[in-house]
Amino acid sequence: MITNNDVLGSRIKRRREELGISVAEIAEETGLSKATIHRYENGEIKKLKRPVIDAIADILKISPDWLIGTTDERQ
């Protein structure tokens, strides 16, 4: 079964790669460490914090709801 954490992680990584954005760039803009961004991408973060999701979505120019898998609409 795919959890929202898995969906979130794969969507962050896919969109980040589409835009050519590095993990370091996301980390710098969000104030998180590169390791934390990697943990999000790998589905290791169990308690998803909405402000962090919103910040990452803004950087990736997509909807936070798409990131967490509650919609298939990117915008």
Image (cartoon, rainbow, N blue to C red):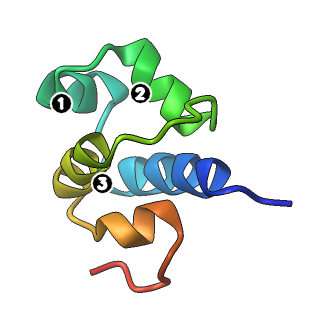
Q: Quadrant of residue 22?
A: top left
Q: Are marks 2 and 3 in contact (CB under 8 Å)?
A: no
Marks 3 and 1 sit apart, C-alpha to C-alpha, by 17 Å
Residue type at mark 3? Leu
1 and 2 marks in contact (CB < 8 Å): yes
Q: Residue at left 30%, top 54%?
A: 19
Residue that mark 1 sits on: 30
- Amino acid found under the numbered disc labelled 2: Ile
Name of the residue lying farthest toward the bottom: 73
Q: Quadrant of the N terminus?
A: bottom right
The three-letter amino acid code for the residue at tag 1 is Thr
Which of disc 3 and disc 2 is earlier in sequence?
3
Q: Earlier in the sequence, mark 3 or mark 1?
A: 3
- Is label 2 or label 3 in front? 2
Q: Residues within 10 Å of mark 1 (few under 14, many from 20)?
A: some
Residue 54 circle label: none
Is 13 on the left or on the right of 10, as rendered? left
Secondary structure state at the residue bearing disc 3: helix
Residue 45, placed above or below residue 51: above
| Disc 3 crowd, CA 10 A, few/some/many (<14, 14-19, 20+) | few
Q: Position of residue 51 (x, y in %)?
A: 22, 44
Looking at the figure, which quarter contains the C terminus? bottom left
Q: Secondary structure at mark 2?
A: helix
Give me the disc on residue 19: 3
Q: Residue at x 55, y 46 (%)?
A: 9
Q: Is residue 27 left or right of residue 1?
A: left
According to the picture, the residue beneath numbered tag 2 turns out to be 37
Spatial separation of the CA atoms under disc 2 and disc 3: 16 Å
Instruction: Give the residue displayed 63% in from the left and 38% down from the top.
Output: 43
- Residue with the most extreme right position: 1
**Is the residue under label 1 in contact with that under label 3 (CB below 8 Å)?**
no
Residue 74 place in picture, x, y as percent: 36, 78
